[in-house]
Amino acid sequence: MSRARRWLLPAVIAALFLYLLSLSMPKGDPLEENLGSRSQNTPNTLAAAHTPAAQADKALLSQNTNTSINVNMRMVLATIPRSGNGWLRGLIEAAIGVGTLSVFPEEGAVYDARTQAYGPDCGWLGDCALVHAPREGDPLIVKTHFPFTTLDNKADLMRRGLSDAGAHVAYLFLPVRNVLDNHEAWVRYNRQRHGNASFPVSTLREFAAAWAEHHDFWFSLGAPCFTYRYEDLVDNPLAILVRMLKTSGLWARYALSETDLLRVSSVPRLQSYRRKQTGAQTRHRDDVFNSFKKYAPEDIQWVLTQHRELLARFGYDQLYEAWLAAAAGRYNTTELEAHVHRIMKMTAETATWGESL
């Protein structure tokens, strides 16, 4: 036997041994261990939002990512309060028949160790004839307000690129609402909730900073995502829903058809949201045409100056410029509505979700 053959056989055996040893080693992610707890001791596992290198660049509206559904994949609805997250959860549940979840306790929801989240038995809709809790194999759609909401270890989590939404985040739903209307709705909600018109809430400047931090954080992760504007959800909720379901893979996973949308339109709990489309019976219209009347021009200008780059991602820079022009008397009501409609339609058409509007 030649010298080469004498050392080749031991080398092959050694390589095979190392390979078999690697298969027996644990595959756990060290980032998923010992990352602290939520400020309210919520029993959630904090872990990295795993993002493929191919999606490393910041997400843009025109770069919404198509995907297909895998067993038990974790899909995160990362929202700022009062940006329509409850509405969207109801639309999703009515369409696919599977309940959505939350990282924090909600009314009627219980914590489930398998999903590492809270969820009612009959979903956010509370309709047991229509919705069931996620079963083995169903995708897990989990709502979080992180990093808008504050955790004891928030800064450390953000530095590590982590969230409270659980392990192996496979897909991201990222709604956005223009910061002035979002802040106004947040203030109004909190004061109504506490029954106190002077209840202390975040100032516009504090809220705007948290709003920008929230969206910058999720964009920076580069996760496969579907981004949409609250204002377009108000204008055409079923179009946004269909585009979101198809882009995320939920449409194919549950073999949905256009006729499935009929039950979405008839769900009782979703009927109250129809008022948002016309502003009927409410003093707080969500039509983006009249909102500027609620704000001082200097506040509109401050937000535009401080956060123009991020606002421009969603077309809100042009919206605020139109508001300032209307406040200065350069548009009457009819002209403003026509101009804002053109702005919102034009900026929606640069995004994949806007193709159906």
Image (cartoon, rainbow, N blue to C red):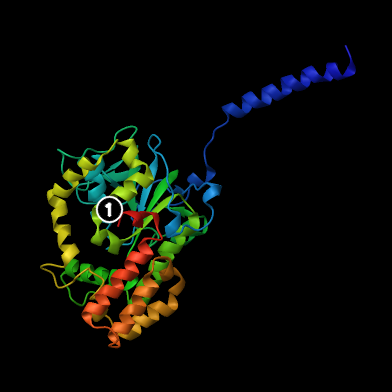
Q: In the displayed orientation, state which residue is furthest to the left.
A: 281
| Residue at image point 15% right, 70% down | 195
Toward the right, the furthest residue is: 2
- Classify mark 1: residues with Cα within 10 Å, few (<14), some (14-19) or many (20+): some
The residue that label 1 is drawn on is: 239
Give the secondary structure at mark 1: helix
- Residue 42, percent across and down? 34, 50
Determine the image quadrant of residue 296.
Answer: bottom left
Quadrant position of the N terminus in the picture: top right
> What is the three-letter code of the residue carrying label 1?
Ala
Q: Nearer the viewer, residue 163 or 313?
A: 313
| Residue depicted at x 13% and y 69% | 282
- The image position of residue 107, as x and y in percent, is 20, 51
Q: Residue most toward the top?
A: 1
In screen coordinates, is 132 left or right of 73?
left
Residue 336 visible within the image: yes
